[in-house]
Structures are given as structure tokens and as C-alpha cells.
Amino acid sequence: MATINVLILVCLAYVVFLFAVAFAADRMAAAGRGKWLRSPVIYTLSLSIYCTAWTFYGAVGNAARSGLEFVTIYLGPTLVMVGWWWGLRKLVRVGRSQRVTSIADLLSSRYGKSNTLAVCVTILAVLGGTPYIALQLQSITLSFSIFAEADPSGLYREGSSVFWVAAGLAVFAILFGTRNLDVNERHHGVVTAIAVEAVVKLFALIAVGVFVVWGIAGGIGPMMDRIDASEIGQWNVDAGRWTTFIFLSAAAFICLPRMFQVMVVENDDEGHLRTAAWAFPLYLLFMSLFVVPIAVVGLDLLPQGANPDLFVLTVPLSQGNDWLAMLSFIGGFSSATSMVIVSAMALSTMVSNHVVMPIWLNTQEGTGSVSGDVRNIVLMARRVSIAAIIALGFFYYRLSGGGAALASIGLIAFAGISQILPALVGGLFWRRATRTGALVGLTVGFVLWIYTLLLPGMGGAWMPESVLQNGLFGLGWLRPHALFGIEGIDPMVHTVMWSLSLNTLAFCVASLLSFPSPLERLQGAQFVNVFDHSVAPRGWSGSVAQSEDLMIMTQRILGTGPTQEFFQAEAQKQGGRSHLPEPTPGFLNRLERELSGSVGAAMAHAMIGQIVGGSSVSVEDLLAVADESAQLLEYSGQLEEKSSELSRTARQLREANAKLTQISEQKDSFLSQVSHELRTPMTSIRAFSEIMRDTDGLSRQEQTRYAAIIHDEALRLTRLLDDLLDLSVLENGQVSLNLSDDSLRSVLDRAVPSALAGADRKITVRRTRTAERIFLHTDLDRLGQVFINLISNAQKYCDADDPVLVISAHDVGGRVIVDFIDNGSGIPPGARSMVFEKFARVGGDKAGGAGLGLAICREIMQRLGGEITYLPGQGGAAFRISLPQAYQQAAQ
Amino acid sequence: MSRKVLLIEDEPNIAEAIRFLLSREGWQVETHGDGTDAVQVIQGARPDLVILDVMLPGKNGMDILRELRKMEELAGLPVLMLTARGQSRDREMAENAGVSRFMTKPFSNAEVLTAVRDLHAQATRL
Amino acid sequence: MMSGEGNKTKPPGTRPSLFLERQSYRRHRLTDAARILPFLGAALLALPLLWPDPSGGDAAVPLSSAMYYIFLCWGALILAGFVFGLAARRMAAREGSDTGAE
């Protein structure tokens, strides 16, 4: 007996091999090598994710129970593929020309870019997809447990193994499914790995089949005899189920998100359909060829009550052929994993594009701008969605207990997802199909599906027995398994018949009654007449495009760095004569793909169309521009932000320019004022010194007086020069602060007498000394200079008969506020804004200052991390200084 | 014959120096330190000559000069303008406004006296 | 490719219209066949529904015969699809080279 440990080892090795394959394929695709990665064979094999573990194991089980009925699941897709000229060709063409990312995207795009519709489809797909993923996990566990039973020594725990399988699948899907920064890029790694898995599962099933037919039964003839002799040896298929299932599987084949992903999104070349049209049915034929023999032999050989779903494993095991069983296990494992990976990828695209991103963009309104990070957000949303979807499947599996309820979920999911069919087919072939129609039809079908199939299938907790027996609200015609009183139909057939027919009816009626928006009509025309409108993947003829414009636009969306990288790489690719690439069609297509990763496909298309101009702008592009309204709504906020940012920048530039002009004027006026202030005392000095030199007979008194004037004016000059120097030091920030600690009171104690010294008519200073007990850590000398300035200003300019200056101090949350308020007439309102400017003097009085005092005060306060303001409405002149109690470096 | 000069200057020390110089030359010197009502003061004082500072509180010397030149009776009054700003633009402006003589501070006393004498001589010759 | 070459070597004025007409006729015939294929398949696969129902007491069709029938139909469909695919490819290649030559 092969031990379970060997099995796990083989399994792990296989997984590592798959990772390696995916990695190598991605590398090759990135390097531009590996044309075979895009061959029709790979495409055909990738379609085989249709064959999940449910079909790998379940087909045999189904055959053991109902004979040939299992084959319907393969016949439906066969008919679809064979009839590709009708439907698939159009679907793929539309999908590629409209650059859709998922089936939800396709429907929303067809019906006027309705996100509501996309959300509906997404919900439907997740609802149907989650149990399906759970089913795959269950199949892996079941097959594990078969080996575990045979080998009790193995270390196998069901719960943890499922968890690790699920986690591994999530990692794989995230690694290879969201690796490309570009959303439209194909996932070569994943597709190639799936193709490998397709070969493995087919090989495994055929190997078991060959073993059964030639190894056990002894050839085709005896096998056929054995089949006829078995309990399922007669053609006994219910006509209703036969036709319904063929139809249902055909519908699901088109509508399943994972099928859409591999068939349309990952499609590299429409021509591949031609090959897949016969090759994929051939694959399906081989998949089902040995199902009946395996089932019959299993029924013969294995004891009554053995699970027929696992015959593929148990038949070789019972014959002691462990390695065949292991191969078969790997086949089943392949079926399960490939389905989960692609399903999670497809669903995550839908969830992130139609649910997460719109919400995120809404919350971002007005803050962000369109830049490279949008792409990262998209990717992150996808990664999280993948993990969430697989986790959802895992929890569903754990909660449902993996019982029989899961086994039936395959067909139930098929029936659910098929509700998309009317809207899809109608959208492709009927121009007057409307969004309302699609929504109504979808809702009707969806509700009927839940009511008649999903809820009854989930058991009593979800659907009480009374409803099942007597109908909703006791209305007999509402019985879930006998709508409108028509009884005796197989529940599956019943649901498919009613839900799809009523869905279609509702879709048609609502479409006829509603009126499509113009955008919907144009979009409808494009879909229905896709072959008249589009040339396969539309190329750009960019002879008139301006690379520079393109670059500017791209920078707005991707950000500067990535844009320059991209353009440089393209220019180099073209031979690198200039730093900008020529707008060749190839370059434009690549650029568009690059952009679509950030702003959505149609928008990127439209934006390039606008720049490339004339030759390529068709009705379609205009339509795209107009019809992007839905997406534009999402993104325009950010674009608006961007353009308002641009105009803000322009305004700032204008302001800066005006400021520069102003500064230059200020400089002129400053120089002229300095000149004036210097010349005025010098005039007096010169005049009186000449008088004293040239005039004979000056009286002693006159001489003294004139000498005093000269002395005063010389002092004035010195003061002015001191102030100017002080100011320039302060303004240039060269001043070094001399920090020390003391109380506000002692600073004022020193400042008041020195400000009042030498004044003939002293102003009365009133202080509240208790309030001044605030300790400061700052440059106390500079602060004192400010105080002195303010006090002597009051002393000089207060025009009251009995001048009084009130100094009051407060401590407001670590900030010290000191007010200096006198009882004079104050500063007239018009001059208040000017008082802190250099050489500003209110009125014309020339009381000895050069008009630099308050300017110096302002500079000092700024250095100290505080400010000085004029307080209006205090009666007299009132200045307030505020500064932090403790000077902080950062405050500078 | 008494010659009257009106000195409009807000810096008291400069005003005193000019008064000293001109009174020794036999001028009757009147001073005024504000620009606001300078035109009226000139009208009332009817001086033979006006010495006008540019930077005055209330009203700029240039504006005062322009107003004088608009008045018929004062259009020919000799005006000596003094400025501490000393930019060539100021000189142009003053000449456009109709100044008789323009001098920048600091000046030499001899210059002022010469200018006053010249202006007075021109005015009396007319 | 071959026809493209042949076209070029033909002297001008030798009624290419007939050839083109015939080609487009062939193409139409081909697409018609392709369109019929799925319906033919559906009809063939619906045929077993007419077989006698064993619950009605009639002699039942043995499962082996049913298998032979269904897999043969299936194979025939695949073969027809293959032939059609081949023809369509040749047609596309011919059209491509023709437009390329013009």
C-alpha cells in the first residue's frame, strides 16, 4: 500500500512542478519568447477547466447511478463548440474589441455600462461559485481520505489538509493571476499550468480506463458484454433530464465566469476558436469514453455501498495498483486545483472591478489623484478578493460539513449561472434589448432559482418543510418543486424550465416596454453588429499622434516615473534615436494596454483616440468617450482634482510672479527709504557743520546748540544703522538665539525702566505682577528688546493727556500672551496692516525712530516661534505678542 | 525791500539750518512743517520764493508743486525743491511738475544760497 | 498562398470575377454548413429520446448500443468540425494573401 505520506509527497512535488511551469511560462512570455504559449493547443487545453473534480470523479458516480445521463454535461459544451460560428465567435470578438475583463463587465458594457447590472452578475457568480469551490475542496479531502483509510499509520487530518490546500491555491492564484501590472495582459503562467493539468487529468482518466477495459475486463468485447449485463445495462434516461442537462451545460459553458475567463479574456487569437471547435469536443469525448466502463467495473468489483463517486480511485486500489490510483488522484487533484484557481481569478476580477473599486473610489473622492497607485490598488483589491473567495469556499465547506448537500451543488450552480444566458444572448443578438430588461430578467430568474432549487437543496434550516409541502404563505401554486401546480417534474428540470423561461419572458417584455438610453442603443448596435464595426483587435494608425501629448497624458495617469520608463523603453525598442518613441500602432496599442490597467479599457482607448486624432476617431470612439460616463463618474473626480491641481499650480505661479515683482518693488522702495533716512540726518549734520566752519561770530550759545544738533543727528544715524543691521540679521535667519530661563516678570522689570529712561513726560505703566509669574525658556534679551520697543512706542505715540500703558500677561496652554494697551487714540484702521512694515510710520511724526522698530519686533517674534499682532477695538493702540513658553527648534 | 522765503520742511533741524543761512542773507524766513495745508499757507504768505521738501507728512511735495502750478497767481513762483531720496526718477518727476530748481540732500550751504540768489534774480528780472 | 501566386501570374483581364464569385459562393456554402452543424448535432442527440422506454415494458436498448451510437455521433460532429475548421483556415489564408496581393 502506498502510504499517505508518499501521496502527500507526490502531491507536493506536483504542486512545485506546477509553480515551476507557471513561473517559467510567465518568464518566457515576459521575455517575448515562447510562441507556443499562445498556440491553439494551449487554448484548447485551458478550456478543460470545464472538467472539474466534480466531473472527474462525479461522472463515474453519475454513470453508476443513472447510466449515460452523465454524458449530457459534455454534450452541451460540444454543441456550443461545434456551433462556434453562431455564438462563441461573436462573444470572443465582442470581448476582445470591447476589452472586457469578465462576464459581468461584458453585460454591464453592453447595457450602457451599468454597474448595477455588473454587481448583480457578480453576486450571482459568487453565490454560485463559492459552493462550487467548496465542492472541489471536498473532492480533494475525499480522495485523500480514501488513501488515509488504507493507511492508518499516516499523519492525516482532514481539516488541516483542506486548509493547506486552500491556502496553496490562493497563493498560486495570487502569484500568477495578479502578477501582471496590466489588467488586460494574459496570464500565461496560469494558462500554461492549467494546460498541463488538463493533460494530466485526461491522461489519468484514460490510464484508469485502459486498465479497467484491458486489464480487468479483458478487451472491448467482453467489456461491452459486462456493461450490458450490469444493473445500468439498459438505455434508461429521462427525456426531460436529458434535454435539460444538455441545454443547461451548454448555457453554463458560456456563462460560467471561469469559462469566460479562459475562453474570452485569456484568448490571444480569435483563430484559436477554429481549432478549439473540434479539439475541445475531442478532449471531452476522451474524458467520457471510459466513464461507463469504470462505473460498471466498480459496481461489479466493489462491495455494495461503496461510494461510486470515488470509483476512479478505489477500483485501481482494490486491484492493488497503487501507482495508478495515485496517478488518478493527481488527475482529480489537477481538476480541482485548476478550477479553483481560475474561478477565484475570474470572480476576483469581477469583485474588485465592480464592487471594491467603485467603493474605494467613492471614499477617495476629492483626495487622491490618478496616479500609478491606482494600479496597485486594483491589484491589491484582486489579491484580497482571491484570498477572500477561496476562504469563502473553505468556510462553506467547513460549515456545510462536506456532506451530500455539496454533491448536488454542481448542477445547482450551473442552473444559477445560466440565468445570465437570456441577457447575454439577447445582448449579442437583439439590438433593442435594454438594461431594464436584463435587470428584470436576471432578477426573476435569480429569485426563482434561489426559491425552487438553492434553498430546498440546502435543507430544512433554510426552507421549512411547510413551505416545501404547501407553498409560500400556504399558496399551493407557489410550492418550490411544483410551481403553478404542475407536479411530477424532476426538481432540476422544473427549476431550469421555469426560471429560464420566465427569465427570458421577463427580459423580453421589460426590454420591449422600457426605453434604452442613447448610450445603450449605440453600445447595443456595436455588440450586435460587431463584425461590421470592428477589425479584430483594433489597431491604431498613429501617424498624426503626438508623442509628447501622449506622454503628458500618460504622466497624469501613471505618474512621472513609470511613464518615463515606459516611453524610454519604447524609444529604445524603436532604435532609440530620440527620447520619445514614434507613435507606431504597436506602441500605441501597448500604451493603451498600459493605461487601461489604471483607468479602464474603454477610457484608455478614448483618451488615446483623442490625441491620435482624426484618422482613428470613429463613432465608436466618440461613443466610448461619451459612454464612459459611468466609469468617468468614478474617475472624473480624480481627474478633476488633477486639473484643478494644475490650475492651482498655475495660480501659484502667477502669485509667485506677482510676489517677485512686489519684492523687487519693495527692494527699490526699501533702498530709496534707506537713502532718505540716511540723508536726512546727514543733511542737518552737514549744514550745521558748514555753518560752524564758515560763520564767524557765532555766539557761544549758538555754537553749543548747533554742536548738540550735530551730535543728536549723528546718534540718529547710528541708531538707524544699528536697526538696519539688526533687521537684516533677523531677516536672514543668521541670528543665533541666546536661550536662557527666567520669569516674564523679571524680563519686564528690566525692560520697563530702560524703555522709559530719558523720556521727559513718562507714561504710566500698569502691570499685574502676579500674572507675570510665568517662566520662560527663550532668548530673553530679544524678548526684552521687543518689550522695550513696544513700551517706548507707547511712550512716544500715546496722545492721551494722561498716558497710561497697561501690560497684561496670560498663560494659554503653554503659550504666553502679553498685551500692551495704551489709552491713546490708537492706530487708524487703514494703517494697521502697515505698522509692521519697514519704515512704516503712522502719521508723519518723526519722533526719532526710523520706522524699523515694529518690523524688528515682528522678526524677533517669528524667530522665537511666536507672533506680534495689532489688537483692534481696545480703545488705544494695542499690541499682542504671543510665544511658546519654551522655545522649540521646530518652532523656527 | 523785504524778500520773503517760505520754507516747507518737516525736519526741524534742517529747517533751522536753512533759516539761519537765509536770514543772514537778509531774507525773511517763514517755516511750515506739514504738507496737508501747504498750498493754503503759500497762498496766504505770498512769498517771493518757496523751498519745498518732497517727503512731507500729509501731502507729498510733488503734489503741492503741481497744485501751485495750476494756480494762475502762483504759476510763476520760484520753487526750490529738496529731496533726500535722490533718485533720478524724482528729478524727472519734479521737472515735469514745473520745479524751478531741484537739489538733493545733503546739500552744501553755498549751493543753497547760490540757488536762492539765482532764482530770485531770475524772478525779479522778469 | 498557392492561389495568391497563381493570381499574380495570371495576365490581367482574364476574368478574375468568376473565380472570386466561386470563392465567395464556396465561403457561403461553408458558413452555412457550419451553422447547420450544431442543429444537426442537437437532432442526433435528441434521437435517443425516441428509443423505447424500458419502464413501458418494451425491449430496452442495451447500453452498449447506446454508447456506440452516442460516441459515433459525437465523433462525427468532431470530424465535421475539424473539416470545417480546416476549410475555414484555408479560406482565411487565401483571402489574406489575396488582399495582400492587391
Image: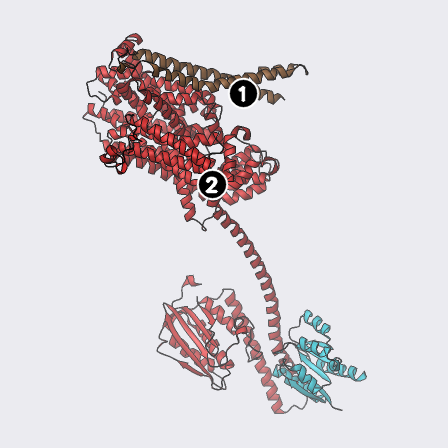
Q: Amino acid at mark 1?
A: Ala
| Chain designation of label 1 | C
Q: Position of residue A843 (x, y in %)?
A: 57, 78
Whether label 2 touches label 1, CB < 8 Å: no
Chain letter for the part of the structure drawn in cyan: B
- Is B50 left or right of A190, judged from the image as shown? right
Colour assignment, chain C: brown
Residue sitting nearer the eye, A475 or A646: A475
The answer, for residue A306, to whether it is visible in the render is: yes
Quadrant including the N terminus of chain A = top left
- Is A857 left or right of C1, judged from the image as shown? left
User: Which numbered dot is residue A582?
Assistant: none
Mark 2–mark 1 Cα distance, whole angstroms, equals 36 Å
User: Which numbered dot is residue C92?
Assistant: 1
Residue A408 position by quadrant:
top left
Q: Position of residue A727 (x, y in %)?
A: 52, 69
User: Which numbered dot is residue A598?
Assistant: 2
